[in-house]
Amino acid sequence: MFEKINPPTRHNPSGYTHGVIVPEGKRMMFISGQLSGNIQGVLESDDLVTQFGACLDNVLTVVRAAGGDARNIAKMNVFITDFPLYHAKKREIAVAWYARFGEGFPAMTIIEVTEIFDSKGKVEIEATAFVD
């Protein structure tokens, strides 16, 4: 859907794309930071991997409500409260990613923060998508 830009003068990205060009005629959609909360907004797990998967699901729910899917997401910002834990769980997080996005990788930034809106939260994901 997007033209991925990974210049040969940059390192080979793993789990993201250096740049994305959006096709002409698409509408831009901003997805607010999504926590792992259920429909009542309750975070049901303390586990980082479970929370990461639920955050991805919540982002995809918003994108699907606008008629898109994972391929419509051009940019993601992932806010993590514990980088060492994120690195320790990277393989399990990758499994959660592939289950929802396959080999599709948007432009992405991962940022460590001291706290998220819900103090039980370990991850929050916001995204920018382009839909018809």
Image: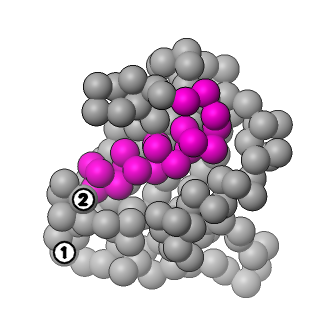
- Res 28 seen here: no
Q: Residues within 10 Å of mark 2 (few under 14, many from 20)?
A: some
Q: Is residue 58 magenta?
A: yes
Q: Is residue 55 above or below residue 72?
A: above
Q: Residue at x 30, y 78 (%)?
A: 23
Residue tagged by mark 1? 25
Q: Secondary structure at mark 1?
A: loop
Q: Residues within 10 Å of mark 1 (few under 14, many from 20)?
A: few
Q: Secondary structure at mark 2?
A: helix
Q: Position of residue 122 (x, y in %)?
A: 61, 29
Q: Nearer the viewer, mark 1 or mark 2?
A: 2
Please give the range of residues in magenta. Answer: 45-63
Residue 114, quarter of picture: top right
Q: Position of residue 103 (x, y in %)?
A: 56, 76
Q: Position of residue 47 (x, y in %)?
A: 64, 34
N-terminal of the pair, mark 1 or mark 2, is 1
Q: Residue at x 47, y 64 (%)?
A: 100
- Marker disc for residue 50: none
Q: Is residue 65 magenta?
A: no
Q: Residue at x 67, y 28 (%)?
A: 81
Quarter containing the N terminus? bottom left
- Marker disc for residue 64: 2
Q: Position of residue 41 (x, y in %)?
A: 34, 25
